[in-house]
Image: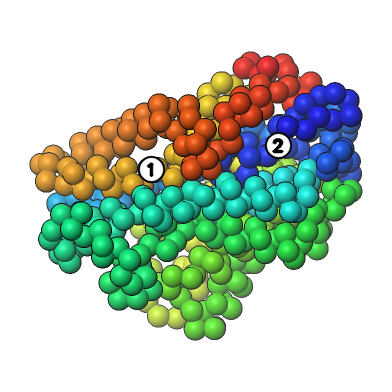
Amino acid sequence: MTRLATGVKVRKCDGPVGGSCGRRAPSQTNYGREGTALDKTGRGPERYYDIDWVRVIGVLSVFTFHTTMYFNTWDWHAKNKVTTTAIQPLGLTFLVWIMPLMFVVSGLSTHYSLGRRTPGAFLKERFARLGVPLLLGIFILSPFQVYSERVTYGKFAGTFWNWVPRYFQGWYSVTPDGNFAWMGLHLWYLLVLLVTSIVAVSVGGKPRADGRPGTLGRLFQASGPLGVVLVPPLFIIVTEGLLFAAGLDKSQAWWPLLVYPALFALGNSLAPDDLLRATARKAGPAILLGVLATTVPLVFAQEPRGFSALYVAYHLLKVYCSWFWILGLFYLAGRYLSRNSPALQYCNEAVMPFYVLHQPVIVGLGFTVRDLSLPVALKWPLLWVVSLAIIMTIYHFIVRPFDPVRFLFGMKPRRQSQGETGTKVSPAAAQVPGAR
């Protein structure tokens, strides 16, 4: 908890995945004591509730995508007895933008967070908020998922407890039939984000004290709203092209460690002067048309095999589709979800535990009911609803009330969290229903 010179208490950013981050970082930002970013009146940071909602929507979309993975024809940790290609267009639509969105939001969050604390304090928090849940995932939540995968594809036929000693044999996705999930399976996001945060702080340090963008941000700023819409995807395409030229491809385990930091850098560079959100507001309707124009052909197109002009065109379409989705979500959230509410406060705090729990619950439930004879049209919504209920029950009654469990899931102590949730963060926030 930080107290500004004016006497107004403000919450600190809870980080990229869990908790709140949406502090305003306007042009010519001033910084209060301990690096706390002040608004232009000097009365305290202004909340960006739309960013909080975008994060919540992103994590719920990841959950929905993983429920479709149980039924489609792609390889996964657990599969229904009957799979179908009919659900794959929905899964592909989510796949195009969900993780790019999460890294862009993480980049924005990191900029706001570093504006109010030292790099050392930021990294200490990152290790607690990301590293601890990652270890929980590696050693507690991943073994059953790997076991389920081995049973699903006929590589093991015994019980889970008979298989457990094999968990430490080989490296998952690195060595042939390796079992040890060194990246926590779905928690690879936390690993990449932790490494990226360390590099970002080591190379970039704190944001400029005047709130102005860095070199990359100035490039986007000079290009205007049209440049913010059209140039960032080219940055991603060049990054991927360099990796392909180096002999790497998306099937290799370290691909996310090399590609997704570029999206993090985009979010971080577009945070000063509110470049990303301002562009989304100005070009919102055109961006939504771009979402429609790129999603429809992408969902029904077949990815070309081998390097060719058609292959390049396909990936250009895919990257632009992803970027249009990200900007479109910021536009819609800024227009319709820019207010605080008790629901947002609850969901925002639940984001990290929900993300950590969602895939183990889906896999465990799916493995249990794989022989249940129901049409996919009925079984998928059933899996979605029951998985959601199980996750939220675990969170509400087991994780949320107890500080030791909260720590394991990357949450702050309950007393500190309650104090922050009830903080009046700006005069504007005081007028929002549910803000205290």
The percent coordinates of residue 27 (x first, y second) are 85, 44
Placement of the N terminus among the 4 image quadrants: top right
User: Relative to 429, is 133 above or below?
Assistant: below
In this rendering, position of residue 435 left or right of residue 207 = left
- Which label sits on residue 12? 2
The percent coordinates of residue 134 (x first, y second) are 48, 53
The percent coordinates of residue 24 (x first, y second) are 76, 37
Q: Nearer the viewer, residue 95 or 294?
A: 95
Question: Label 1: which residue?
Answer: 358
Chain-order first, disc 2 or disc 1: 2
Residue type, mark 2 in image: Lys
User: Relative to 343, is 153 above or below?
Assistant: below
Secondary structure found at label 1 = helix
Whether residue 193 is visible here, answered yes or no, is yes
User: Relative to 256, is 20 above or below?
Assistant: above
Q: Nearer the viewer, residue 48 or 153?
A: 153
Disc 1 packing (10 Å; few <14; some 14–19; many ≥20): many
Q: Residue at x 62, y 50 (%)?
A: 126
The percent coordinates of residue 204 (x first, y second) are 76, 62
Residue type, mark 1 in image: His
In this rendering, position of residue 356 left or right of residue 332 = left
Q: Residue at x 24, y 34 (%)?
A: 382
Colour scheme employed for the rendering of this structure: rainbow
Disc 2 packing (10 Å; few <14; some 14–19; many ≥20): many
Q: Residue at x 24, y 50 (%)?
A: 71
- Which label sits on residue 399? none
Placement of the C terminus among the 4 image quadrants: top right
Whether residue 232 is visible here, answered yes or no, is no
Residue contact between numbered discs 2 and 1, judged by CB atoms under 8 Å: no
Q: Nearer the viewer, residue 308 or 360?
A: 360
Give the alpha-carbon distance from disc 2 to disc 1, as whole Å.
Answer: 26 Å
Q: Residue at x 12, y 41 (%)?
A: 372
